[in-house]
Image (spheres, grey):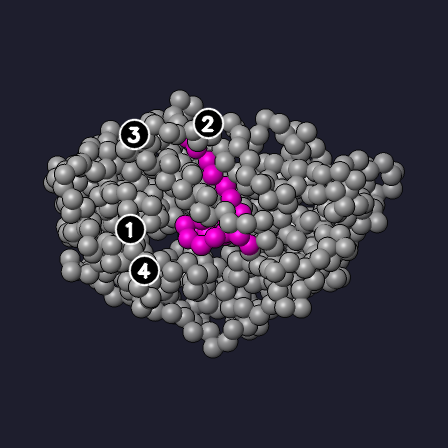
Amino acid sequence: MKKNLLFVLCLLLSASGLYAQPKAPDAEYIKANYQKYEYQIPMRDGKKLFTSVYVPKDQSKKYPFMMDRTPYSVAPYGTELYKGSLGPSSLFTHDGYIFVYQDVRGRWMSEGIYEEMTPEKEDHKTNKDVDEGTDTYDTIDWLLKNIPNNNGKVGVWGISYPGFYTTTVLLSRHPALAAASPQAPIADLYRDDAFHNGAFMLVANFGFYPGFTNRQDDKPTQRRGGRFDAGTEDGYEFFLKMGSVKNSNTKYYKDTIRLWNEMLDHPNYDQHWKDRNVLYHLHDIKTAVLVTGGWYDAEDLYGAINTYKTLVKENPKTPVYFAMGPWVHGGWARGEGDHLGDVGFGGSTGPFYREKIEFAFFSHYLKGTADFDLKPVSTFETGVNEWKTYNTWPPKESAEKNLYLLPGGKLSFTAPTGVADSHDEFISDPNKPVPFINSIDMDMKREYMTADQRFASQRPDVLAYETDILDNDITIAGNIWANLKVSTTGTDADWVVKVIDVYPDSTKNTKWAGKDVYLSGYQQMIRSEAMRGKFRNGFDKPEPFVPGKVTPVNFELQDVLHTFKKGHRMMVQVQSTWFPLIDRNTQQFQDIMKAKDTDFKKATHKVYTSKANPSYLKVRVVE
């Protein structure tokens, strides 16, 4: 939901009219063809939620509702002020729907106290037992009874945080809810946005909350949040100088941001986070669902993949569709989707999704269009740059194989055979951490998801393992699991694993290659993830390492659909810092959120590559 504040939050706010922006292409059409209304819709506990409704002026036929529930504001406020765009895309604007935008409880002009990723309730025994599901139910009921010329069907969509609210719409289980599309939804706040396997997502969260925090009480407002001015564009240097995470308050926030403090107060997966995992509640769903995500979504990749997998598992008779393209967070909603950073995808992918998948899905379930042949799974295969369709995900055509880290920096599907307990080691210094990207930036630069990793492989604190030149294509589809055997001289350590496609030396530059970038030998990151080692046996029960003891550390890198082409190489990199994407581990067993600047210590880490202690990635290879 978060994180590159300029890319995500400002983009959403500018679309709402809170920031000045050029006139949208549909602005005049909307004013000419829609009438805007504003309502305070009552909920069962007496609170009222501010809602903007855009109704087609042509009242000769009935229309379905298309609704977006958001914490990012339904602005512009005032019935004489109109949005510059309506619906998921221009296709919806011109096809005719009743568009509904609602400020969720506790945000902007709606009443109530805001909770981040509102905990859902299984039981609602009294009118005081409210959550996003009940708020949605009450909203839909009110709309059906009070907005004329509706056809009795409701569709809901939303990207990022609104994607979470779209997931919770399903929990209303309202009979009029015919279709919903959670897009890049947060599913488990601990795992999506706050922490990745216990490692705190520092740069993504730090800049987000000042802008997001426009109110912390129950008083409706149109006041925006502020922007944090770091005084520099060099995030690496800024966060090093900030020191430990607790200094974010002593130096900058002064304990004034409640939601920021909630993250710092809960570094373990305790009840606070378990209450904010919506996946537990996705049962008995009858509504048709289209889950959308991007392979290069740095924010909520986990949410999209696991929302889909959970819905399919728990609701086998419900029509559930899954679309994944080569996109960053929300990248399918606008633009061409033809490249990310230096890497091209062979042409436009965004328009195809918007017309052939998203628009077709809602048209069918809300308006009954007959020409609907959407396959259950539509995924873009990077590497060969082709759309593929499947009946299930991961595809049944894939089979699990182990990709082993071998002595001498080798990588192979053949297991190690040596008797000696071979290993590679490096010194991890949290005061000189490995950067997550080879550029100067104050935000979580989204291009890191495909960026050249040669800058990292040249460092002594990064281990690199590489296959021979491939003599045939290798396609991996589905999730990747890192299974490491490691040891450390400290009592805690982070482990970062990156899967990389190494281009042939003969590769020529394309128009997407940046200045001073050479695709010859390019090390394109395909998937990467971090693991805070003390959580290796459970995110709710941290355990120290025994110094020098060989210890298994296993964690998921999430799903991919990528082909390593003939003539390329496969590479795996292992490191222990990734800054400031994740916070620094003191490499001592302690609550890092309360660490002092003097607590950060060097440690020697070993990764084992022997028959007795093999380290490998479990991947799914398409046969």
Q: Position of residue 381 (x, y in %)?
A: 58, 41
Question: Left of 428 or right of it: where is 234?
Answer: left
In primary-sequence order, the first of circles 1 and 3 is 1
- First to last magenta residue range: 320-339
Disc 1, disc 3: CB below 8 Å?
no
Q: CA distance from mark 4 to mark 2?
A: 41 Å
Residue type marked 4: Ala
Q: Closest to the observer: 141 or 607?
A: 141
Alpha carbon separation for disc pair 3 and 2:
27 Å
Q: Where does label 3 land, which residue?
A: 368
Quarter of image, res 603: bottom right
Q: Which residue is mark 2?
A: 313
Tell me residue 589's x, y (percent).
60, 54
Q: Residue at x 46, y 35 (%)?
A: 322
What residue did someone put label 4 on? 24
As helix, strand or loop, the secondary structure at mark 4 comes to: loop
Mark 1 or 2, closer to the camera: 1
Residue 107 vs residue 261: left or right? Answer: left
Residue 86: numbered disc: 1
